[in-house]
Image (cartoon, rainbow, N blue to C red):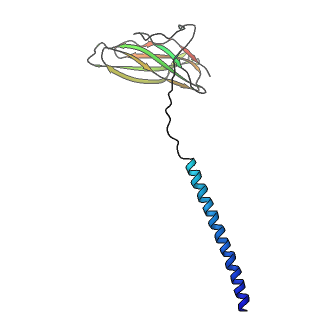
Amino acid sequence: MATRSTAVLASGTASTAKLFVAALAFTGAYVGFSAYDTANSAPHPAQTVTLSARELPIISPTTARTPQAAKPGKISVSALPGDAGCVKTFVARSVVINAEPDHTVLYGWELSRWSPGTNTWHSYFVNYDGFAGNTKTVRWNPSITNNPGWYRIELTVEGAKTIKSDRFQVSC
């Protein structure tokens, strides 16, 4: 009986040893694969990318074929290229003259959208700013997302009348 028990015990120990070695091999392979995967997901060194953009004029029957220089009392509007989908970004420019250069002059931009239902212009987006000094060429970059229609940009300067751009159409 002692020999049978020894034989069973020896064969059980051999199986356990084989299982243990297989488990170690599997664990080692898993750890090695994980380390390999982590090494591949490490961030790559940063690369310098130079982007450039150019402004395109909004072309309609009422505007010139080239971008207008910023002038007092006028708003020039140009479309910026490169937006994806139905996103349109514009740049509006004008010159603001400060009647009191020693004090800050405040001004506000407003993007208005034409409502055909009420036949009126409604505020779509506004922005306020200011500066101290004699004269400044001011600029604003409003974006319109998924909302085609007719728009115009208005500039209100503290102590002066509001000026309005020509209307322009946004389509997708």
Residue 66: x and y, percent? 52, 9
Q: Residue at x 27, y 19 (%)?
A: 103
**Farthest left residue in view:** 102
Q: Residue at x 30, y 17 (%)?
A: 133
Name the quarter where the N terminus is drawn: bottom right
Q: Residue at x 48, y 19 (%)?
A: 91
**Would residue 129 be found to the left or right of residue 35 on screen?**
left
Q: Is residue 8 above or below residue 123?
A: below
Query: Residue 170 lies in what quarter of the image?
Result: top right
Q: Nearer the viewer, residue 9 or 136?
A: 9
Query: Residue 115 lies in what quarter of the image?
Result: top right
Q: Nearer the viewer, residue 20 or 70?
A: 20
Residue 46: x and y, percent? 49, 38
Q: Nearer the viewer, residue 110 or 36?
A: 36
Residue 64: x and y, percent? 53, 7
Instruction: Tally the marks.
Output: 0
Q: Is residue 91 above or below residue 32?
A: above
Residue 78: x and y, percent? 51, 16
**Would residue 124 be found to the left or right of residue 84 on screen?**
left
Q: Residue at x 61, y 20 (%)?
A: 171
**Would residue 100 be found to the left or right of residue 144 on screen?**
left
Q: Is residue 73 above or below residue 48?
A: above
